[in-house]
Image (cartoon, rainbow, N blue to C red):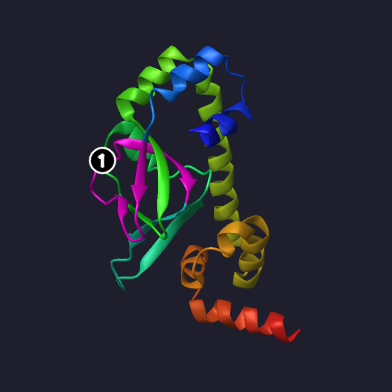
Amino acid sequence: METLIKSILQHIPLTPEEIAACKNFWTEKTLEKGDFLLRNGEICRHDSYIVSGVLKAFCINADNGNEEILFLAIDHWWATDIASFSKQKPSIYNIQAVEKTRLLQISHPSFQKMLKEIPSLEKYFRIILEGYLGTLEKRVVFNHMHKAEQKYYDFLETYPNIASRVPQYLIASYLGVSAEFISRIRKKNKSS
């Protein structure tokens, strides 16, 4: 819980009473490697903060059966289907543990109650959503404007902690390239 409180305090101030109240809304959950946090068609009942571990969000491509990675999330990040959670409608993708993952979770009703009791948390979650939206916008631009090699180098620069923790086939899927393409780039860099 302390890592989440520390994250919140980096963005907004909370009184000791608000911190104590905030802690009451969260529960801990552990996923083993391969466990699903959310499956396509299920309603996302919890917002999840990653204490430690790695999660991948993906859809299955109907044409070829391959996973299409939507996002990768590591320690101190959020992993939620925002649309499903906020509207309490079925999810259109899956979220699965890449490695053993410890989470802090809050249910949708508890989230609403927490925001009512601690209104300053609205600002924190707005800041988190703005950051997420900025990341999505950058990804859309990069996917349309940059060649695959540049997308890979930008990924390494932007997310070095993810690149060191997940298999390259997941990075390839996230970038929309083949794992073989990434292998060629890495070989080229080693020989340079």
- Relative to 84, does residue 8 appear above or below in the rendering? above
- Residue 114: % across, % down: 41, 19
Q: Please state if 41 lies on the left or on the right of 1 as rendered.
A: left
- Residue 46: % across, % down: 33, 36
Q: Residues within 10 Å of mark 1 (few under 14, many from 20)?
A: some
Looking at this rendering, what residue extends furthest in the right direction? 192
Q: Looking at this view, is 154 or 9 the one in front?
A: 9
Can the viewer see residue 101?
yes
Q: Quadrant of residue 68?
A: bottom left
Measuring 61% from the left and 23% from the top, which residue is drawn there? 12
The quarter of the rendered structure image containing the C terminus is: bottom right
Looking at this rendering, what residue extends furthest in the bottom direction? 191
- Which residue is tagged 1? 43
Measuring 45% from the left and 21% from the top, which residue is drawn there? 22
- Residue 38: % across, % down: 30, 48
Query: Which segment is the magenta one?
Result: 28-52
- Residue 86: % across, % down: 35, 32
Q: Amino acid at mark 1?
A: Ile
Q: Looking at this view, is 32 or 13 the one in front?
A: 32
- Relative to 111, does residue 188 appear above or below in the rendering? below
Q: Please state if 90 lies on the left or on the right of 81 as rendered.
A: left
Q: Looking at this view, is 7 or 66 the one in front?
A: 7
Question: Is 40 colored magenta in this rendering?
Answer: yes
Q: Looking at this view, is 179 or 137 the one in front?
A: 179
Q: Please state if 18 lies on the left or on the right of 27 as rendered.
A: right
Q: Quadrant of residue 162?
A: bottom right
